[in-house]
Amino acid sequence: MEIKVNTGILSANEQKAVENRKLFKENGVFAINLMGSPGAGKTTVLEKTIDYLSGKVRLAVIEGDIYTSKDARRIEKYGVPVEQINTGGACHLDAKMVSGALSKFDLTGLDLMVIENVGNLVCPVEFDLGEDQKIAVLSITEGDDKPMKYPLLFRESGAVILNKMDILDFTDVDLEGLRKDIHIINPDIKIFEVSARTGQGIDQWAEWLTDRVKDTVK
Ligand SMILES: Nc1nc2c(ncn2[C@@H]2O[C@H](COP(=O)(O)OP(=O)(O)OP(=O)(O)O)[C@@H](O)[C@H]2O)c(=O)[nH]1
Ligand SMILES: [Mg+2]
């Protein structure tokens, strides 16, 4: 009985995700789903990315959070269109929530949609939102064992941003081991070493993203 119900929920999400994906495609919008633990630095990376892409890529942001609009308020300051979704307790966004937010944007004038998911290393990965690419943000302060302990996000993502590189020397992280583990889980994943605080590595990540956006037919 329970299995039946779960299957129903998942396929309803899949159906909405297909619609969202179609909408992105029809409007020539490349969409990414930014995921990682609470505090990994998703919003800070996004702020620096917006700065870098300013005047080059027309982007908008959907912020997912359980209760607050704090991240949306931060993004608003950069003058890009932003919509906040509050899940009201759920640990992830779903395709229906994203569909509701999408109706508030003029997609025809956009090249890129960034969806920042609820901070969580596990459950957001299971829900297709209709994005083109999942992107993982892992702070090196979380420890080098995290990819092997929580492999699904790294398996499903096109790129991983290793954030907070500015404080690497204050951690016991084995960077080479960490890179190796990520590539064992997903040999094709791109790894960017970034500090959203100093701006280190933001150019390489943002250029890679720009190339993906350019590949999207307008
Ligand atoms: N030292 C250092 N701190 C950083 C860096 N990036 C983010 N932070 C700090 O880490 C904290 C969390 O950053 P956020 O960008 O809010 O993290 P988040 O992943 O968006 O968090 P949630 O949305 O709550 O899941 C803040 O205090 C940031 O200033 C970095 O590269 N280096
Ligand atoms: Mg955030």
Image (cartoon, rainbow, N blue to C red):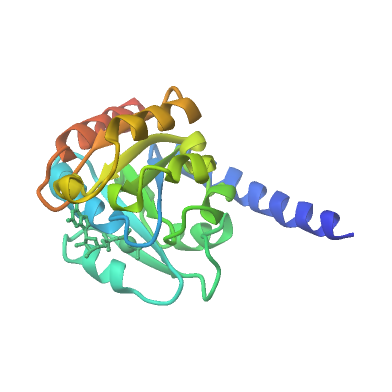
The answer to whether any part of residue 209 appears in the image is: no
Can you give x and y, in whole percent of width and height, for residue 88 in the image? 52, 76
The answer to whether any part of residue 19 appears in the image is: yes
* Front residue of this view, candidates 113 and 34: 34
- Which quadrant does ligand 1 occupy? bottom left
Image vertical order of residue 176 relative to residue 17, above or below = above
Q: Residue furthest top?
A: 187
* Front residue of this view, candidates 160 and 19: 160
Can you give x and y, in whole percent of width and height, for residue 153 in the image? 49, 43
Residue visible at 31% across and 54% down in the picture? 42
Residue visible at 35% across and 38% down in the picture? 160
122 sits to left or right of 136: right
* Front residue of this view, candidates 146 and 65: 146
Can you give x and y, in whole percent of width and height, for residue 147 in the image? 45, 41
Image vertical order of residue 6 relative to residue 155, above or below = below
* Front residue of this view, candidates 7 and 180: 180
Can you give x and y, in whole percent of width and height, for residue 58 in the image? 24, 45
Q: Residue furthest left?
A: 198
Image vertical order of residue 111 relative to residue 107, above or below = above
Q: Residue furthest right?
A: 1
137 sits to left or right of 125: left
Which of the image's four quarters has the N terminus? Answer: bottom right
Which of the image's four quarters has the C terminus? Answer: top left
Residue visible at 35% across and 35% down in the picture? 178
Q: How many marks?
A: 0
- Residue 96 occupies which quadrant of the picture? bottom right
- Residue 179 occupies which quadrant of the picture? top left
Residue visible at 29% across and 73% down in the picture? 70
